[in-house]
Image (cartoon, rainbow, N blue to C red):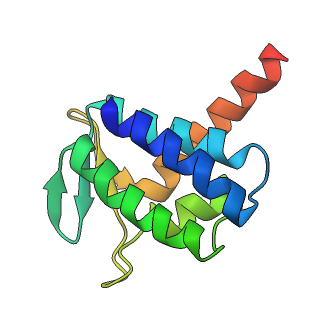
Amino acid sequence: MKNVLLLLTLICSASFAAEPKDQTPIEVAHLVAYLETSGCEFNRNGSWYSPEKAVEHIDRKYRYLVKRGLVDSAEQFIDRAASRSSMSGRSYLVKCGEAESVESSAWFTDELQRFRAARQQDS
């Protein structure tokens, strides 16, 4: 949970410098928290990692991209920081329990759609 709080702080401060869309920091923070609390394993370049280790890695990539003004939407966060290795180009995978692993881009996109729908219902 401390990683989520740290990421929220970094997202908010970095978001002012890069001027992302208003909802981007909220949506990215939700996606990161969703991964961190999911209990799902995260595959990067053929190795499986805990959600906490995955969050550390994705956070590093996200901060790098924000500093360079390369992320201004949750979709860009998913595509540029949370979908594939920048080094090998291999897709990241997510495996929850006994279910088949899925590409992280689809996993995050599905959750982003659920999150947006729930927020829209609440307003």
Work out whether residue 67 or residue 116 is closer to the camera in this orientation and state it. 67
83 left or right of 28 in image = left
Instruction: Point out the residue furthest to the right here.
Output: 123
Report the residue at 61% width, 46% height from top.
Answer: 12
User: Residue 113 appears in which quarter of the rendering?
Assistant: top right
User: Residue 5 appears in which quarter of the rendering?
Assistant: top left
Q: Quadrant of the N terminus?
A: top left
Work out whether residue 105 or residue 9 is closer to the camera in this orientation and state it. 9
60 left or right of 65 in image = left
Seen in the picture, residue 103 relative to 31 is either above or below; the reply is below
- Residue 11 in picture, x, y percent from top left: 56, 49
Report the residue at 22% width, 32% height from top.
Answer: 97
Task: Answer yes or no: is residue 83 visible.
Answer: no
- Residue 44 in picture, x, y percent from top left: 25, 65
Seen in the picture, residue 38 relative to 103 is either above or below; the reply is above
Q: Quadrant of the C terminus?
A: top right
User: Residue 43 appears in which quarter of the rendering?
Assistant: bottom left
Seen in the picture, residue 14 relative to 5 is either above or below; the reply is below
